[in-house]
Amino acid sequence: MPGIINFVNVSTDGLESSPVVDALAGLRANEARYFMNKYTHEFVTVPAADAPEIVDRITLILRERDIEIASRPLEVTDFVVDGTRMSYVFFESGLAVNVMYTLENAAKRAVGFKLSQDMDVPVELASKFKFARQKSKLAGEIRGSYFVVKGEY
């Protein structure tokens, strides 16, 4: 069932199986707040099983770097804002993967990784990326990294 993510009253709905459920809910709410504040866009997620094409698209893009996420996808979203297609997968492990893909040109196309507080860096990412730290009122401490997308998707 689709749901608008509320960043004022953070909910764990849809994320209950995660061992870092509260931190992952905060991370998801942090993303919702960003899009509302910057673009006045409501961040709506659906269960990953209801939109496998979003998971498949992100999986395809991750193959550029020979990355396969071992964790189970829980929720996804995909939308266009300000000429950029944004796709997200929130994984059971506490990992959030997003793809920022400009539609008109290849100027801003990247994959971002965000780790929930208290989440270990996944083995599949540990040797490939360094993670910077960022503080968030909603998510505590977020660690993140990214890579530039080179292919056309």
Image (cartoon, grey):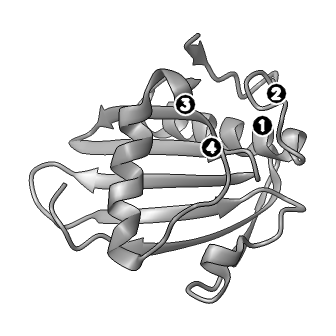
Mark 3 residue element:
helix
Residue located beneath label 1 in the image: 25
Say few, some or many: other residues with alpha carbon within 10 Å of mark 2 (under 14 / 14 to 19 / 20 or more): some
Mark 1 or 3, closer to the camera: 3
Q: CA distance from mark 1 to mark 3?
A: 15 Å
Q: Amino acid at mark 1?
A: Ala
- N-terminal of the pair, mark 1 or mark 2, is 2
Give the mark, 1 or 4, whose residue is nearer the N terminus.
1
List the residue tagged with mark 2: 12
Circle 1 — which element?
helix
Q: Is residue 44 above or below residue 148?
A: above
Image x and y of residue 25, in percent: 78, 37
**Sooner in the amino-acid sequence: mark 2 or mark 4:** 2
Residue at 75% x, 73% y: name it. Answer: 121
The amino acid type found where label 4 is placed reads Phe
Q: Which residue, given by chain and number where applicable, does mark 3 sit on?
A: 48
Q: In the orientation shown, which residue stands out farthest toward the top?
A: 1
Other residues around mark 3 within 10 Å, as few (<14) / some (14–19) / many (≥20): many
- Circles 1 and 2, Cβ within 8 Å, touching? The answer is yes
**Of discs 1 and 4, which sits in the foreground?**
4
- Gap between marks 3 and 2, in whole Å? 15 Å
